[in-house]
Image: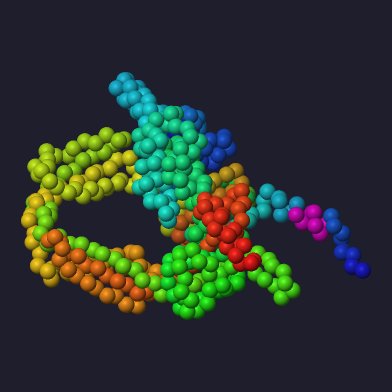
Amino acid sequence: MSMLDITRFIRGYVEFEASGSFPERLINLSLRKGLNVYDTRGSGGTVRGRVPKSQFEALKRLGLRCGVDIRVIKTRGVPFIYMHNRRRSGLVAGAVCFAVLCYFLTSFVWVIDVEPTSRVSEYEIRQALKDHGLHSGAWRDSLVPDTIERETMMQLGSFGWMSVNITGTVAKVTVSEKYSPEDTKGEEVRPCNIKAKKDGQIVKMDVKSGESIAKLGDAVTKGDLLVSGVVSTESGGDFLSPSIGSVYAETTVEKTVEQPMSYKQSLPSGNFTQRSMLEFLGIRLPLGLSYVPYESYSSQRERLNFISCGSVMPVDIYNEYCTEYRENDISLTKEEAHKSCLAALALYEAFHMRDCEIKKRELKGEIKNNTYVLTAKYTCVEDIGEISYIGVDEGAEDGAANEQDSGAQSESDAVN
Amino acid sequence: MAEKQEGGFLRNGLFSRIEELKPSSVFLEMKGNTEVTIEGCKGILEYDSLLIRVSVGGAAITVNGRGLCIKCLSLSSVVICGVITSIEYEG
């Protein structure tokens, strides 16, 4: 429906049929009189058309003048709807209530549009916003965007910039992540040294900038200077430069995992219950009479959102799946305990040693006090270099400030 | 040097434009066979879904076709739409 159609509907119009000896004359005359006759159709010696309600009387007079019979086919528009329903006071009251309800409901924030970042999930941002008053169903006039922005940024701490824009019933939250020195690792521009963060024997060095102090095959201990940012020139002078590079060393790591030979463990019994709840503007209403009859259970919650025109509506359905758990006495054999420890080691290798290349792994298992203890001794190759800035600026990071003394010491060592 | 036009600017330019703007002149524009605009019309003489006849001063233009209707009508022009099969000029 175009704006023209809407305007015509608001003004109201009459659809008529003109019949007689020469109905076309009516169109010509109405045009000359300035009457707005539109959507004309001619067939079988009659002409149909539409005219605004306010001009229909003038059209009828023209029809009398030119000997054309005008018959009303239908009337449409707001004035006619009002005329037909003016005695029905309930409708008027309903319309007033509707307007008041619309006004009242638009006083709340219904939709919160959040853009997640790579480090902070959308859920975390929503929870932080909720803690500071911005949630679905919040009273719009009580919200102060500046305060919400400031307090949310302070709580989450990983945002460099944040904006909360409340437009109508939608709050759009835009965030930008904070600059992190890790983002520019390997691109240091400030003078720095590279020091060893672990004991080991150097097997490979890839130094792009700075002066190598350690050499291949050297055994280094934690804190030893590997690459110096104080570079000597041929003319005998020194200058400071950022040390960029990787120093790989063969290191040893020992990890012990334990597995009791007999223990109690909660396991799913196979019974489960589902509960559903309707959440509207922060209020939860149970859908159904089901309850959780178990003493010990785990619950898995699922939230179903209603989406309209790309926006998440503040009406959710919560489904909660509760699975009963019962305690069982479990006794393991030595082989089973060994397998369990191996699984724990595999997780350790996957999450804690992902940057290392494991060269050798020696395992030693024994039972002590009804517990199977598995000790793994890894020989691996990893980058043991860590940045240590030389000198301190006012805007230096905390880590750099902590290493001020050691960095300065390294510098003086290198100069000497 | 540019050759001087015979009759000058008034005769060749302005007067010819005035000729074009005379009320008796008719201008027809067709978009495929579905829409025709007639400028310079004086009124509707006949209006049917198969035929629309428009007065253009001392002559008449008949548009034949199927499902014809007047889309837009003003004091000096008319837009006819539908499936147009022929247009006749009755001088």
Q: Position of residue A97 (x, y in %)?
A: 34, 25
> Is residue B30 placed above or below A5 in the rendered structure?
below
Q: Quadrant of residue A82?
A: top left
Q: Position of residue A385 (x, y in %)?
A: 49, 67
| Near-viewer residue (A78 or A237) | A237
> Is residue B72 placed above or below A343 in the rendered structure?
above
Q: Quadrant of residue A290?
A: top left
| Near-viewer residue (A39 or A329) | A329
| Near-viewer residue (A146 or A223) | A223
Q: Residue at x 53, y 67 (%)?
A: A225
- Does the image show residue B80? no
Please state, as top left, top right, bottom left or bottom right, where the N terminus of chain A lies in the image.
top left
> Is residue A5 placed above or below A234 in the rendered structure?
above
Q: Residue at x 92, y 69 (%)?
A: B1
Q: Quadrant of residue A415?
A: bottom right
Q: Position of residue A322 (x, y in %)?
A: 15, 48
Magenta part of the protein: which range?
A: B11-17
The main secondary structure of the magenta stretch is helix
Q: Residue at x 38, y 28 (%)?
A: A104
Left/right placement of residue A291 relative to residue A311 reads: left
